Image (cartoon, rainbow, N blue to C red):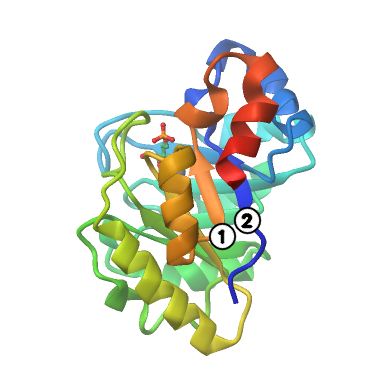
Amino acid sequence: MQGIVRVAPSILSADFANLGAEIRAIEAAGADYVHVDVMDGHFVPNLTIGPMVVKAIRPHTSLVMDVHLMISPADPYLDAFAEAGADILTVHPEAGPHIHRSVQRIKALGKKAGVSLNPGTPAKMLDYLIDDIDLVLVMSVNPGFGGQSFITSQLKKIEAIRKMIDKTGRAIDLEVDGGIDAVTAKAAIAAGADVLVAGTASFKGGAAHYAANIAALRG
Ligand code: DX5
Ligand code: ZN
């Protein structure tokens, strides 16, 4: 069943020189998860942050730390991100040959396991994973950068995955990531998403606007 809508600001759009303060501000503004975009300049054409930064920001929030790994390979880094304080670790099947192994490792580390699908990857990829995972992340842009436009074809995929999740009878987050604003958030929620990742839309205008920005996404 679709859960209550939660908002996960992506710190990719935060002020990196003031990350601690930015995270405290989005928590005060009503964020549910802190979404951390980890990029390696190989799986995606951008470089961001590693486990040291996750460890540094961990004491600044009690929110769920939702770590999105856009790295290939991911397996050698799962332990480090878990130790750094991630609560959810999400991996891409396109990033390596052993997604099932990655999911099992994340669970063995005592963390929630997420699987993320690029816009060109079919929902079918989840057939033999869905019973083991805690979160599905549908990329509504090609991963690598904030500020891109929402790819509307992904709404159909969200609808299909919503059905798949409901069939399991388990509580699995259905998260959508990329190009989320007040309008696309509505469409994603209508399609069955219940966690909205938003970078640009959460952080626009500075801290005084964060509460209104986040509220606008809940619809
Ligand atoms: C893209 C990242 C997203 C992105 C979202 O690779 O996974 O989390 O930062 O940014 P906006 O909300 O600006 O599209
Ligand atoms: Zn992300």
Q: Position of residue 171 (x, y in %)?
A: 63, 75
Q: Position of residue 75 (x, y in %)?
A: 43, 57
Above or below, 126 relative to 138: below
Of callouts 2 and 1, which one flags the residue occurring earlier in the amino acid sequence?
A: 2
Q: Secondary structure at mark 1?
A: loop
Q: Residue at x 66, y 53 (%)?
A: 87
Q: Is residue 37 visible?
A: yes
Q: Is residue 56 visible?
A: no
The three-letter code of the residue at mark 2 reads: Val
Q: Which residue is mark 1?
A: 194
- Taking the image as shown, residue 135 lies to the left or right of residue 71, namely right
Above or below, 28 relative to 2: above
Say whether marks 2 and 1 touch (CB < 8 Å): yes
Query: Residue farthest to the left?
Result: 120
Q: Residue at x 48, y 66 (%)?
A: 192
Q: Secondary structure at mark 2?
A: loop
Q: Residue at x 27, y 52 (%)?
A: 152
- Taking the image as shown, residue 49 lies to the left or right of residue 152, namely right
From the Cβ of disc 2, is ligand 1 less than 8 Å away?
no
**Residue closest to the eye, 77 or 218:** 218
Badge 1: few (under 14), some or many (20 or more) residues near its Cα, within 10 Å? many
The three-letter code of the residue at mark 1 reads: Asp
The quadrant of the picture showing ligand 2 is top left
Q: Residue at x 62, y 56 (%)?
A: 5
Q: Quadrant of residue 161?
A: bottom left
Q: Which residue is mark 2?
A: 5
Report the Cα–Cα distance between label 2 and label 1: 5 Å
Above or below, 109 relative to 81: below
